[in-house]
Image (spheres, grey):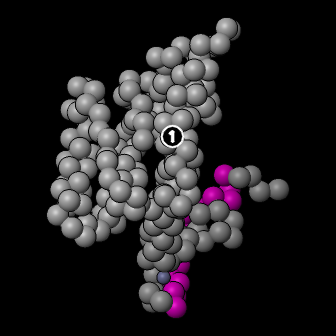
Amino acid sequence: MNSIKDMISDKEKPQDCEVHGQYISKNYFGQIWGKCPDCSKQEAEARIEREKAEGEAQKKERAIKLWAAKIGHAQIPERFRDRTLNSYIAKNPGQETALAFAQDYANNFEEICKTGRSVIFVGKPGTGKTHLAIGIALQIMVRHTVLFTTVQRAIRRVKDTWTKGSEESETDDRCDQCNCLSRSADHGRSRRAVWI
Ligand SMILES: [Zn+2]
């Protein structure tokens, strides 16, 4: 019986590749001969590309899931989720001013957040107040916690904290879904939640 050592050879022979022509093939072991080096190189490159594309696709999928979770977490209703500042069309000078204000507010939110400066949009129905508020929220949501609510709901929530045995203090910005405080790690670095 041949030992493994006997089966390992350093033999070489010319081989033909249909694509790259003649090459010298090495006999590695028994009947195992080396493939065309150019084909091997191409296969390796293709594998790297494929893995890279798969990695990017997974990364993209994770980002989409994370975004969907954030949107759900923020309780922004489905019908409002495309209301970005970019999609807001200002039709009169008042709306132009409001849009410019909203853009400025969102762009400088890091600083504004530290001062606690709030904003209330006032206007007739259908002028785009909710659109602007959500536009700000969608822009700053990448780094901050956002919560869509109504005045009634917010008041009820504060009132609920007055009941005996309530786990929530009226000063907490506690999240409904996971009961975290808005300053906890995964939900933005800000200590303040943004209430729309
Ligand atoms: Zn080849």
Q: Position of residue 49 (x, y in %)?
A: 45, 66
Q: Position of residue 153 (x, y in %)?
A: 56, 35
Relative to 185, does residue 68 appear above or below in the rendering? below
What is the tally of numbered marks visible in this picture? 1
In the image: residue 91, left or right of residue 75: left
Relative to 157, does residue 98 appear above or below in the rendering? below
- Residue sitting at x 29%, y 34%: 118
Depth order, front residue of 21/55? 55
Can you see residue 162? yes
Depth order, front residue of 66/62? 66
Residue furthest top in the image: 164
Relative to 12, does residue 170 appear above or below in the rendering? above
Residue that mark 1 sits on? 149
Quarter that holds the N terminus: bottom right
- Residue sitting at x 35%, y 56%: 124
Tell me the kind of residue under disc 1. Thr
Badge 1: few (under 14), some or many (20 or more) residues near its Cα, within 10 Å? some
Residue 15 falls inside the magenta stretch: yes
Q: Which residues are magenta?
A: 5-18
Residue 31 falls inside the magenta stretch: no
In the image: residue 5, left or right of residue 88: right
Q: Quadrant of residue 84?
A: bottom left
In the image: residue 19, left or right of residue 119: right
- Residue sitting at x 17%, y 64%: 93
Label 1's element?
A: loop
Q: Position of residue 131 (x, y in %)?
A: 39, 57
Depth order, front residue of 38/45? 45
